[in-house]
Image (cartoon, rainbow, N blue to C red):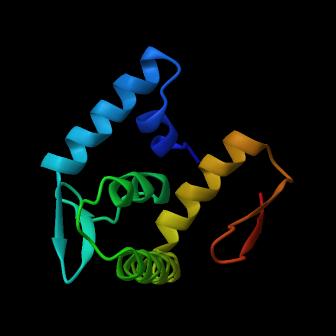
């Protein structure tokens, strides 16, 4: 995790200044707050933790606890949707994915989906 607050308070290199300026611009012009939750306008996602720390440090005006809880809910929803999509794949989709994994890992290898726990021996 990048310490953007440190970059903001005490930059040691030009790239730190440039990065903080870029993020500050995105925070000021590319976010919105609804019910205390800070989100990116472009994706409706909660910003990463290190960026939230900078937003909080500059007093952007959001509820950190509510925002962190929203991130947890967003991740849970995304994982549930992913697992559902995995469970609803067609035989053709499964065959294509297994062919891609076989090409990447080689025949006979066992690949584990870290989200679903499903193991596939290629």
Residue 61 position, x and y percent, is 23, 67
Establish if 23 lies above or below 14.
below
Farthest residue toward the front? 9
Which of 5 and 120 lies nearest the eye of the viewer?
Answer: 5
The residue under the point 48% across, 26% down is 11
Q: Residue at x 48, y 64 (%)?
A: 93
Quadrant of the rendered image containing residue 67? bottom left
* Residue that protrudes farthest toward the top in the picture: 14
Task: Depth check: give the residue in front, 73 or 105.
Answer: 73
- Judged left or right of residue 107, residue 63 is left
Tell me which residue sits at (27%, 41%) in the image. Answer: 24
Q: Quadrant of residue 95?
A: bottom right
Q: Residue furthest right?
A: 108
Q: Residue 51 vs residue 94: left or right?
A: left
Residue 120 as seen in the image, left or right of residue 87:
right
Tell me residue 75's x, y (percent). 46, 75
Q: 23 or 12: nearer the eye?
A: 12
Residue lying at 33% horizontally and 56% vertically, measured from the top left: 55
Give the vertical position of 80 relative to 100 (above or below): below
Task: Please provide percent x and percent y for residue 106.
Answer: 79, 43
Location of the C terminus (image quadrant): bottom right
Task: Please tell me which residue lies in front, 31 or 105.
Answer: 31
């Amino acid at each position: 995790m990048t310490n953007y607050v440190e970059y903001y308070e005490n930059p040691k290199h030009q790239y730190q200044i440039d990065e903080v300026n870029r993020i500050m611009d995105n925070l000021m012009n590319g976010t919105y707050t609804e019910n205390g939750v800070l989100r990116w306008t472009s994706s409706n996602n909660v910003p990463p933790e290190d960026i939230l720390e900078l937003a909080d440090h500059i007093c952007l005006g959001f509820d950190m606890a509510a925002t962190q809880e929203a991130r947890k809910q967003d991740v849970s929803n995304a994982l549930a949707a992913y697992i559902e999509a995995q469970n609803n794949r067609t035989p053709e989709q499964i065959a294509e994915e297994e062919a891609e994994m076989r090409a990447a890992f080689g025949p006979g290898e066992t690949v584990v989906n870290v989200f679903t726990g499903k193991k596939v021996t290629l």
